[in-house]
Amino acid sequence: MNAENLLSINNQLGEGPLWHPDEQALYWVDIAAHCIFRMEPGSGQYERFGIGQPVGCLGFRDSGGLILATKNGFAFWTPGAETTEFIADPEADRPDTRFNDGAVDPQGRFWAGTVADEPTCGLYRLDPDLSVHKMETGITTSNGIGWSLDHKTMYFTDSGVRTIYAYDFDPATGAIENRRRFIYTPDEPGVPDGLTVDGEGCIWSARWDGWKVTRYDPTGVVEREIPLPVQRPTSCTFGGAGLDQLYITSASVDLSQQDLKEQPLAGDLFVLQADVRGLAEPKFLG
């Protein structure tokens, strides 16, 4: 299975791709460029929206528009709007942090975690009533989040310790407990980054500095690896009319001139025709 270059965009830090089935469009962010992208793969047309601050991740709202996790906390945004609607900044006293990756859970709550140079970051849950709950501490680099098919397990990536954790997840309350290592790869090149869960319950994890995306079965065994022509794949999501297209974002940030010469597709958007289907993304109910 080989991924194809879908869009030559050279993102600095492309991240957080999500497929909007109603629009048949892909959304993603470039954190370092402070912008959001929207693309309709059917036509190849895309749009770029400047947000004015780093946006770590986004989710779709059931009422329309997007929920964002930004440098300055949670916010609502509608494509084309010149400003965001601020909700809350749970780390307003931490100018050294910013929000990174996140996801909407199957019950319509928005989860996002922060990143900094020290292992002092947090994972937060934003409920539909817009209340914010700190769910985890001591994180280095918050990254990919997903849920098992029965909604009883939550996967959460801390790239700084090369680990994807699994938690027991209570769908009714949104509580998490019993953290354990699902994937720990201290001797493998690169670190786990963004992830998505497919319709068979397997986890697809982008490998930053690892030149690949890895598919793990629900027990954590490597099922397959998808090589990529770029060093820093960042995240992935399923989309397309049949939810069988795997879209993969990547980054070019902090690569040397020689690196960029050797991998001219760094920062581009890729697509893989998969032999499995993904899951429709839940929408934030707030």
Image (spheres, grey):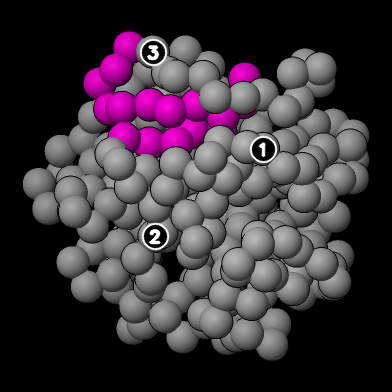
Q: Which residue is drawn at 57% across and 75% down?
A: 151
- Identify which residue, 185 or 243, lies in the foreground: 243
Q: Residue 30 carries which label?
A: none
Are there few (<14), some (14-19), or many (20+) residues within 10 Å of tag 2? Answer: many
Q: In this view, does 140 lie to the left or right of 84?
A: right
- Highlighted range, magenta: 65-82
Q: Mark 2 points at which residue?
A: 281
User: Residue 132 location in percent, x, y?
Assistant: 67, 37
Q: In the figure, is residue 90 to the left or right of 231?
A: right
Q: Write the residue at 74% across / 36% down.
A: 115
Q: Please indicate, yes or no, whether residue 57 appears anywhere in the rendered image.
A: no
Disc 3 packing (10 Å; few <14; some 14–19; many ≥20):
some
Q: Does residue 36 sit above or below 126 in this rendering?
A: above
- Three-letter code, disc 1: Val
Q: Give the labeled residue for mark 3.
A: 83
- Mark 3 in CB contact with mark 2 (< 8 angstroms): no
Whole-percent x, y for residue 8 in the image: 31, 39
Of badges 1 and 2, the one in the foreground is 1
Q: Which amino acid does label 3 sit on?
A: Thr
